[in-house]
Amino acid sequence: MELFTPDFGLIFWMFVAFAVLFLLLWKFAWPAIMKGVDSRADLIDQGVLYAREAKEQLDNAKQQAEEFEAQARVRQAEILREADRMKSQIIEEARTQASREAKKEMDAAKVAIEQARKEAQQSFRDEVSAAALTIAQQVVGQTLANPEAQAKLVDNILDNIEKAD
């Protein structure tokens, strides 16, 4: 039963061993432990600061991304408006050019029709003149054989000239 009731000498030597161990730990180990704890606390504090800075940078990056996105939307809207304006302008230019081309074709067709009409009239006049000359030659040929008919024809022509004046 000595384990349950220790002697005074055992208690004394245990106390001396504890005090020596405590003093050695307090003198050498405790500062190293405290230095490690302090460095770990500093490291944690720096990590917190880095995390805060990273969060701020992330928030700034998000804000910049939103601003860039808004600018991109504005630019996209401007580009779409410009494209729509250009489309309208191109369509209007195409209509104007088509109208000019149609007018040119119509004018050319009118000129061609007028020229064809004049040529047809001239051809008709030439044919009528040729027929009239042929008829006149036959009529005059028969009429001019008689001297009285010749005088009558000259009188009729002179009368017509006087009436025209």
Image: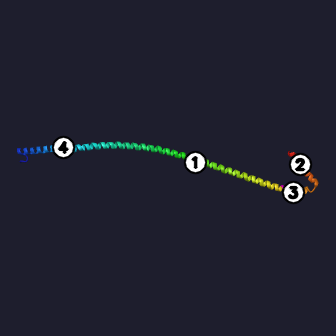
How far, Cα to Cα, is label 2 from label 1?
70 Å
Q: Secondary structure at mark 4?
A: helix
Q: Which residue matches tag 3?
A: 137
Label 2 with label 4: CB-CB less than 8 Å: no
Residue under numbered circle 4:
31
Q: Which stretch is magenta?
A: 132-137
In the rendered structure, which disc, 1 or 3, sits on the residue that comes first in sequence? 1
* SS of the residue under disc 3: helix
Residue annotated with mark 2: 158
Q: How far apart are labels 3 and 4 at the CA level?
A: 153 Å
Q: CA distance from mark 1 to mark 4?
A: 87 Å
Q: Which residue is mark 1?
A: 91
Instruction: Rate crowding at label 4 as few (under 14), some (14 to 19) or many (20 or more) other CA atoms within 10 Å.
Output: few
Mark 2 or mark 4: which comes first in sequence? Answer: 4
Q: Nearer the viewer, mark 1 or mark 4?
A: 4
Q: What sort of colour scheme is used for the picture?
A: rainbow
Q: Looking at the image, is mark 1 or mark 4 earlier in the sequence?
A: 4
The residue at the point 33 percent across, 42 percent down is 53
Q: Amino acid at mark 4?
A: Pro
Residue type, numbered disc 1: Ile
The amino acid type found where label 2 is placed reads Leu
